[in-house]
Image (spheres, rainbow, N blue to C red):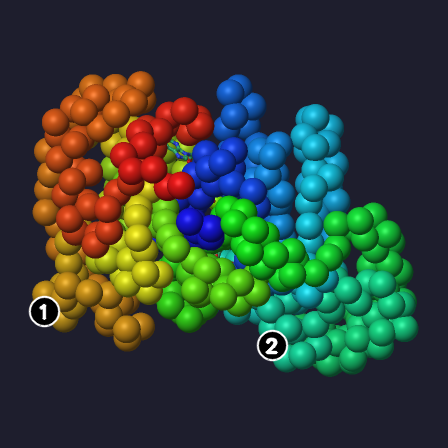
Amino acid sequence: MPALVLLGAQWGDEGKGKATDLLGGSVDYVVRYQGGNNAGHTVVVGDQKYALHLLPSGILSPGCTPVIGNGVVVDPSVLLSELSGLNERGVDTSKLLISGNAHVITPYNVTVDKVTERFLGKRKIGTTGRGIGPTYADKINRVGIRVQDLYDESILTQKVEAALDVKNQLLTKLYNRRAIAVDQVVEELLGYAEQIKPYVTDTVLVLNQALEEDKVVLFEGGQGTLLDIDHGTYPFVTSSNPTAGGACTGSGVGPTKISRVIGILKAYTTRVGAGPFPTELLDEDGEALRRIGGERGVTTGRDRRCGWFDAVIARYATRVNGLTDFFLTKLDVLTGWEQIPVCVAYEIDGKRVEELPYSQTDFHHAKPVYETLPGWSEDITKAKSFSDLPKNAQNYVKALEEMSGAPISAIGVGPGRDETIEINSFL
Ligand code: GDP
Ligand code: IMO
Ligand code: MG
C-alpha cells in the first residue's frame, strides 16, 4: 500500500493533524498538496501541543520526510518562523522538502486578500486573511511567483513588476490604498531565498522515485471537502482542491498510485467563516459543543460555528473523494447528552432530499431532518477498543457508519496520540 490520502470530510478542523501524526511514525513521507498557512492542524504529543499551519504534520515524526508539494502556496516568512519555532522546541526540521513549483504568497497577495474582504462588506467570505485566494488567482492568471523564481533576480523582478502593474491600479484607484513598490517586494523575497534554498527540490521526482522503491507516502489535506473550490459550498470555500483529486495535481503523483483515501470526520460538525451550514446550532447545545470541543480556530482564533452531525455531507464526502475509510474524531465531546440528533436528510422547499443538492439556492434552503439517537454519560477517553465503549456510543458509531457510506476504521476519544480506538489498520 504505497500511497494514502488523509483529508477533511466536512468544513475543516476535523482532526487531520492528529490523524496524520498518528500515522507519521509508520510512513516515509508526509506531503501537503494544497492550501497554505490558512490551515491550522493541532498535534498533541504527550504533554506537548503543536499548532502547524504550513508544515506537514509529519514533521513531528523523526523518521518521516515532510514535503510541501507543488499545489501548496508558501508564505516564506511564515515558513521560516514556523521552522524556527519548532527548532527552538528541539524538533529536527532538516529533512523538509519544498517543491520549486509551489507558488509564493507575496506581501501584496496578503494585502489584496484583506482589502477585498473589506470591500465585500457583509458579502465577505470570512477568509483567514493569509493571501491564499489572491495567490491562487495569480497562479491561474499566470502572473504568480514560484519558489524557483526566488533564485533568479531578473526573472523575479520582471514577474513582480507584471503582477504589480495591475494590482497597483486596483489598490490605488479602486481600494484607495497606497501603491506597493516593486523593489521593496523583490528585496523582501530575496531576503528569504537563501534560507529556504536547502529545502527546495523537484518533489515530483522525489515522490515518484520513493513510490517506485515501495516507500509509504501519506498525503495530508488542508481544509475539508466542503471548502473545496470545485466540490464545496462555493463561493464560501477556499481557493484550492482539498478533495482527493487535489492530492494528485498538488504532488505530481498519479491516481493509480493511491490505494486508500481516509476521510477525517468529526462526530458533530463545525465551520469557520461565512456560508451555509444546515445543522448549525445557535442555542445552548451549540455553545456546549464549542466549549467542550474547544472549538476555536487554530489560525485566526475565531469561534467555530457548531452543529449536529450531518450524514448528507458525510455521504457526499464519500462520493467525491472515493473514500475507503473514515476516521471518526471527537466522539468524547458528545459524552453527556441524553439524546443526540443526527441529520439524515434535508427538507428543501417542502421536499425530502437525501443527497447534497448541487444548486447553491437549494442548499441555502436546506433544513435538516433529524433522527435522534440515545446518548451516553460514561467517560470514554480511556477506551482502547470498540467493545470498551458504552453500548449507546457503539450504536452511535454504527449508525453514522451506515449513513455515511464507508467503514469507520478509527475513533478519536481525546486529542492525544494514544486516545484513539483502532478498528482496521490503515497500513
Ligand atoms: P485539523 O485542522 O483538521 O488538523 O483540526 P484542528 O487541529 O484545527 O482541530 C481539531 C481539534 O480537536 C484540535 O484541538 C485537536 O487537538 C482536537 N482533537 C482531535 N481529535 C480529537 C478527539 O478525538 N477528541 C478530542 N477531544 N479532541 C480531538
Ligand atoms: P484546516 O486545515 C477551517 C476557511 C476560512 C474561510 C474560507 C476561505 O485547519 O482544516 P481562505 O483564507 O482559505 O481563503 O478562507 O475557508 N478555512 C478554513 N476553515 N479550517 C481550515 O483549515 C481552513 N482554511 C480555510 O475560514 O471561510
Ligand atoms: Mg484546523
Instruction: Tell me where residue 365 sits by quadrant.
Output: bottom left
| Residue 20: x %, y % from top left | 47, 40
Residue located 73% across and 66% down the image: 146
Q: Is 285 in front, or is 334? A: 334
Instruction: Tell me where residue 106 sits by quadrant.
Output: bottom right
Residue located 31% across and 32% down the image: 422
Please tell me the numbered disc located at residue 140. Answer: 2
Going by the numbered disc 1, the residue's amino acid type is: Lys
Q: Is residue 133 above or below residue 373?
A: below
Q: Quadrant of ligand 1?
A: top left
Q: Nearer the viewer, mark 1 or mark 2?
A: 2
Q: Is 291 in front, or is 83? A: 83
Local crowd size for mark 2, using a 10 Å CA cut-off: few (<14), some (14–19), many (≥20): few
Horizontally, residue 331 falls left or right of residue 137, namely left
Residue located 62% across and 43% down the image: 65
| Residue 393: x %, y % from top left | 18, 31
Residue located 82% across and 59% down the image: 189
Please tell me the numbered disc located at residue 351. Answer: 1
At numbered mark 1, what does the secondary structure look like: helix, strand or loop? strand
Instruction: Tell me where residue 180 sits by quadrant.
Output: bottom right
